[in-house]
Each structure stands twice: as structure tokens, then as C-alpha cells.
Image: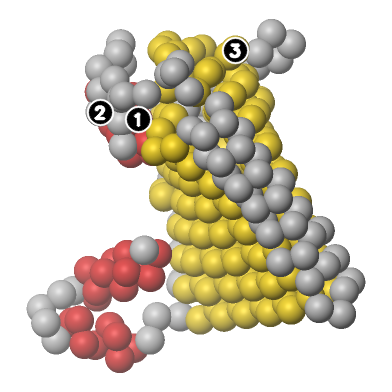
Amino acid sequence: MMDLDKIERDLMREVSGVTGIPEGAYNFRVNGKSIGRHSSDKIDIIPKHSKSGIDIRIANNTRGEIAHIPVIISASGLKEAVYNDFYIGDNCEVTIIAGCGIYNCGADDSIHDGIHTFYVGKNSTVYYIEKHCGIGPGAGKILNPTTKLFLNEGGRAELLMEQIKGVDSARRLTEAELKKDAQVVIKERLFTHGKQLAESKIVANLLGDNTSVDIVSRAVAQDYSVQDFSSHIIGKAKCRGHSECDAIIMDNARVNAEPALDAQNIDAELIHEAAIGKIANDQLTKLMTLGLSRRQAESQIINGFLK
């Protein structure tokens, strides 16, 4: 698989599932440079000339194809902002697998700001998977992802965004604008430990009739880590909006959840839910009676909660 060392290969597999050269379109970015790029018959990947990043153009009626665009940083002190724009034609159904892994063993922070903008055509569906992780004994592993969604009539986007482990600081912004009959589903999974910081802000503008957004966030905060979650659903037409944030807080961590609803139409149906609590003692006791240690029992509960 490409010219990667073992750490880079492990990170690539962790964030994207890639263990070799995949079928279809791909762009592999390592330490600020593309080390492999391939377009398919229906998906064209074009490097930008004015700034760092790529354009991904997907032809009308493309269905069943996958594009891989993972990023790996293993050079301590590397700081980059990458702009990837997705132009998805009409009547498509495609999957985009992104993700970023950082290995830092040096004295300087490594930072990746990924700005992804999706223009989703009429009656098209995009599945977007983004996983983040950090490893290594060095300075900060910092990830600041921005995802912007513009959905035309009947468009649908389903996002799975996970922060697996080891990310010292993350500021995530997700924005969506939905025209008539469009739908967005956002599933977020966050895990923090140590003194890590994770901020997530989601803003959804439901502009057309029969639009809908469903936001579900699951989070676990351990040690002295801090998490801030906010969602803002704005209903400007006949629409449905749902926001749910569930968090497990442990040790001396802090979790803040701020769901907000803004109904600007009499037919806007908007709901929010938020719950923060510790692991229930009866859950721990049940697993420990099966022979697990307390730490093992907590790990089982957390893994199940974040699935």
C-alpha cells in the first residue's frame, strides 16, 4: 500500500478503512501533499490551483460509487487548511469516506483544518463518513473540521462524524441549507479524555416545504476534558427538525449542551432533547458480576453507547 510507514498505514486504516489501493476514485493526502489520486468514469477529482484542496465532481445518475479522501499527518508542527468542494449531480447515490489521523511525536502542534462544502443535486443522496483520531507522545493533535451542505430539491445527506481518540483540541462546525423536500441526518460520536477540548456547533436552515433534519449526538467525556455542543435548527417553512444530545460524564470532566430551536413558520415542527449523566451503578454491577473489572465494565458500556 503506497509509500507509507507502519504508523501512517495504521492511521489510514483507522480513519478510512483503507488497507490498499481502493476501487474507484480516491485522493490520499499525507503531510500536506497528495501521494495518490485517481478519478473514475463518473467521479472526477481535480486539484485546486488557487488554494490547497480538491474539487470532486460527480456526474448525474452516478449510483453505488465510493470516493476515499483521507488525510494523514505524521510531521510534527505541520499546519494546514484544506478546501474540498463536492459537486454532486442529479439523481445520484454516492459515499464519501474522509477522515484525518495525526501522529505527533515532536514539540510543535500539528493542525489540520478541513473545510468541506457539498452542493447536492436534485433527488441525490450522499453518505459522508468522517473519522478523526490522534496518537503520539508529542505536542497538540488539533483538528478543526467545517462541513457545509447545500441541498437542492429532494436532496439527502447522511453524515457520520466520529472523534475516536487522542485529539487534543477540535472545533467542529456543521452548516446545512435545505430546499424543498430535502433531508439531512447527522450522527455525531465524540470521545474525549485527559485535558482535551471538543466543540461542536450545528446550524440547520430548513428553507423549503417538507424539509427535515435529524441530529443525534453521543458523547463521552473522561478525566478533565471539556465538551461543548450546540445545535440551532431554523424552520422557515413546513418542516420537521429534531436534535438529540446524550452525554456520559466521568471523573472531573465538563459537558455543556445548548440545543436551540427557531420556528419562523406556523407549520414548523421542531423538537430538541438533551441528557447528561454518569454511568449507572446497576450497569456496572451487572457487568462486574460477570467477571469484568470496573475499568473493563466502563469500557464495554462506553463502546456500546457510542455505537
Can you tell which quarter of the image residue 88 is in?
top right
Rendered view: 303 above or below 172? below
Dot 1 and dot 2 residues touching (CB under 8 Å): yes
The crowding category of the residue bearing disc 2, from other C-alpha atoms within 10 Å (few below 14, some 14 to 19, many at least 20), is few
Give, as a three-letter code, the residue at label 3: Pro
Give, as a three-letter code, the residue at label 1: Met
**Foreground disc of the pair 3, 2:** 3
Rendered view: 281 above or below 61? below
Rendered view: 246 above or below 96? below
* Residue 7 in view of the camera: no
Q: Which residue is mark 2?
A: 19
**Which numbered disc, 3 or 1, marks the residue that appears first in the sequence?**
1
What is the spatial separation of the Cα atoms under label 3 and label 1, in whole angstroms?
21 Å
What is the spatial separation of the Cα atoms under label 1 and label 2, in whole angstroms?
7 Å
Q: Which residue is mark 3?
A: 47
Give, as a three-letter code, the residue at label 2: Thr
- Given residues 120 and 141, the one toward you in this image is 120
The residue shown at (74%, 11%) is: 50
Q: Position of residue 192 (x, y in %)?
A: 48, 56
Q: Residue furthest bottom?
A: 282
The residue shown at (48%, 42%) is: 93
Display coloring:
secondary structure
Q: Position of residue 242 (x, y in %)?
A: 64, 73
Q: Which residue is mark 1?
A: 12
In this figure, what is the number of numbered marks?
3
